[in-house]
Amino acid sequence: MTSMTAPPTQRPASSAVIDRPAVRHAGAVLGIIGLGVVAYLLLTNLQGQRGQACLLVVLWTVSVTGLNIVQGLGGYPSLAQASFYGGGAYISTIALHKGMPMVLAALVAVAAVTAAGLVVGLIFARTRGQYFAIGTLFFGAVVNLVLNNALDLTGGPNGRPVDLGFAPSTTLRLLAASMSVGFMLFYVISRMKLGARLLSIREDEDLAEHLGVPTARTKLLALTLSATFGAWAGVLLAQYNGVIAPSQFTFGQSFLMFVAIGLGGYGRLLAPLVGSFVVIGLPQLIHVGPGTSQIAVGIIFIVVTLVLPGGIIGGLSVVWGWFRPSRRDDPFASGTPDQPRRPEVTS
Amino acid sequence: MTALLEARNLVKKFGGVRAVDDVSLTLAPTSILGLIGPNGSGKTTLLSLLSGTLEPTGGTVLVDGSSPKGRATHRFVRAGVARTFQTTRLFPTWTLLEALRLAAGERSHRTRGAGPSEIADLLGLSDVLHARCREFTGAQQRLSMIAAALATSPRVLLLDEPAVGMDQAEADTLGRAVRRVREQLGTGIVVVDHNMHFLMPIADTVMVMASGSVLASGTPAEIRADKSVIASYLGAVTA
Amino acid sequence: MGQVIANGIFLGSLFAVVAVGLTLIYGVMEVPNFAHSGIIALSAYATYSAGKHGAPFVLAAAAGILTGGVLSVLTEQLAYRWVRDNPAAAPAVALGLLLILQNTALRIYGGEGKALDVPYSQSILQVGGVTLSGVKVALIVLAAVALIFLSLLLSRTSLGRAVRAVAPDREAAALMGIPMQRQYTLAFLVAGLLGGVAAVAYAPTFQVSPYMADEILLSAFVVVVLGGLGSVLGAVAGGLLLGIVESLGSAYVSASYQSAFGFVALVVILVARPAGLLSSAGRRVA
């Protein structure tokens, strides 16, 4: 994983093999595939509470990786991710129940939620910072209202059962694969023009606009992509869980997905995994009651926000930087390991 | 020959205040226009109207004879207008090269302009191309903002008090850099500044603003000799 | 129709009291205070607890209002003060605080909704064809008293002048020598007390639960966008307007989707004016 948390090196003079882009990319791809394999082994071998925790962490990682685009790279607090997640779960379930084949139901759900993300984006992408947070938060609340009240379709507050579409073993395979594919997509996106544009918006939106970055369109695209990831995770959640209810998709859940990014480290590839583990995995493993674990998450989150702007991964990479004599010759690496990794911008 | 940049009857109101009141100007290709005036006279607001940062209450801005499509600021950049800010710095955690590449990547496809290293050369920033922007000195910050604006391949460059806080030697270096930009890239430039020693030698035309309107306009020599300008502004500065 | 308007005024008064607190805090510190909803819930629980232990209602209500003020100041002292110069981190801190506050309530009192009984629970006010329960009338009265008191405070005292100067321009206020720390604390104190008032007045019409104020908070944020930042009058007018809109939607379209009409209002505003109704777009560079 070292190649993923290393600070960027732009110096052509550097001759270390690991700094060659092709080598670095290959390392990242292998690491991502390796993570998927590990996830699959854990999913198929862990039982009971641990199995449940592992499953939730993988599901959340897929959904939160989408959020990592708009919130992590772009710095825009989207508080609607749980509703995209829920949208994927509910729409695929309803479509399956109406007699669609599972694959089609999943496609319909992902397409419909992506379209919803596009609409939300069209409305709120032109707004700045905190209006965006309030707008997406409210959208999430309205979606939850619908889930609770459209009894015929959603079953209301008690939820509804999910027909079996994928065989359980297929769902597990899809889960592990989705996590890897999600990471891969994020890795590519963060290195494309879209990634650089989002990072420039996170740094200074006004300045980005004045350097020609179409900020509203960029935010729109990022939010739409985040909806796609969330929807697909929701499809898998419904298939695995067998029952879905509005309480799984409240704006409290959206908050927690937001928190997961901040804990992991904004815009870092593995932030969704680390953040989801702390936010949703640990409370499953440590039995202290739901209230207490959430209080702990809240405190940890505030402390990380205040003390570690690069999140847990950022903090770890600072520590890692102390033990790397090979980088001492680089005057700009030593002072900046806490900074988020940035793609090389290709012109 | 159409003007590179033309403003017709620009008006900008903030609440009841007319910050810019019926201002028209034209900028010829490869010329440098200096904008002076006391604080609050509307110079920066005018610059913001020309760059699309602010939307005018009335009047139009034409780039190459046509107005940029859409209201978003980045449309002005695509149309060939770039600007700097008095206080804004480049993205602190980025290297200068990264910022220049981002800006260069946003050019419209038809324009071909100077590359990052050429721009850095022009402004004397080659040594810090790989340094992070937050490590720059004040003068380097201002030059790097100009570099980023140039990376968008503008036909018109708007500079908002680029020499503020610089000593005379730094201001002279900046002045030479601005002239090199005009000569080598053919960019038309509008400069707002208080530093007459910096502005007067490089400007082809100087426009004096007061209370949102144009008080006088002419060559630097004409402006120096203009009695109303001396009375209201220059006198105060040189005294 | 009169009935619907009366209900709208009830809702609107509630929104206004919550929104004024939000707008004060946003005005001085650019924090979208999501934690406000947790403070309201804990204030309601404080009143509930005091009542359970035999305190007379007036005392219990005072305890609840005071709890709101104290908790709000604590959030500022312990958390928000560290992000004063970094508004981008404010939503994260606000959400962390909300998690802590709501789950503290959940931990102590459990998730079951509790009824808050007040002496005027059974009374009903009837004017013409309009019927309003005593608890709703009490909320309108309490909200009006609190807001009148607040606007007197803001218009008559030097502290009020300072808060008003801070809201439009923090830097200018600092340059003018207005002691900023006191203004932050004061804004949070006033917002918290208003949150307490909202809690004590609203809980009897609904229930006491950790999440009792979540939907109200959302509507209150719409009011903040609607009425303009730092404007008490704007918040009151916006609150009443939104209350009546939601009440109309609830009566004539669907009661289940009451707060969704607030969302529609927000969408309409932000589509027309992406930077909010009374924005000062471009202030930064102008």
Image (cartoon, rainbow, N blue to C red):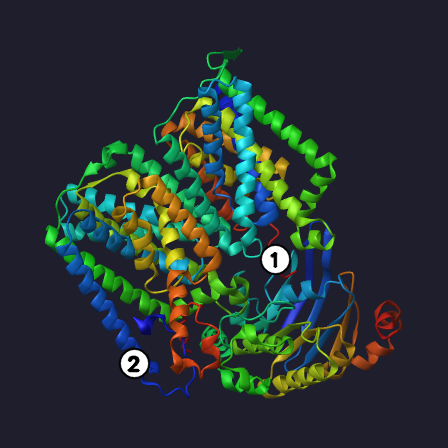
In the rendered structure, the answer to whether residue B16 lies left or right of residue C237 reads: right
What's the residue at 47%, 20% (across, down)? C51
Q: Quadrant of residue C213?
A: top left
Residue A163, quarter of the rendered image: top left
Give amino acid for label 2: Ala
Q: Between B206 and A200, which is closer to the camera in this rendering?
A: A200
Q: Is residue B194 left or right of residue C110?
A: right
Q: Residue drawn at (70%, 31%), measured in percent from left and top? A: C152
Kindly tell me whether residue A328 is visible in this rendering.
Answer: yes
Camera-nearest residue between B75 and C188: C188
Label 2 chain ID: A
The front one of A84 and A300 is: A300
Residue depth check, mark 1 versus mark 2: number of the one nearer the observer: 2
Looking at the rendered structure, the kind of residue marked 1 is Gly
Quadrant location, the C terminus of chain A: bottom left
Q: How many marks?
A: 2
Q: Which mark is residue C237?
A: none
Which x, y percent locates residue A8?
A: 40, 75
Residue A22: mark: 2
- Please tell me how crowded label 1 is: few (under 14), some (14-19), or many (20+) other residues with Cα within 10 Å: some
- The image shows residue B65 at horizontal and vertical percentages of 59, 72
Res. A20 image quadrant: bottom left
Q: Position of residue A215 (x, y in %)?
A: 47, 62
Residue A175 at x, y = what percent? 20, 56
Say which residue label 1 marks: C282
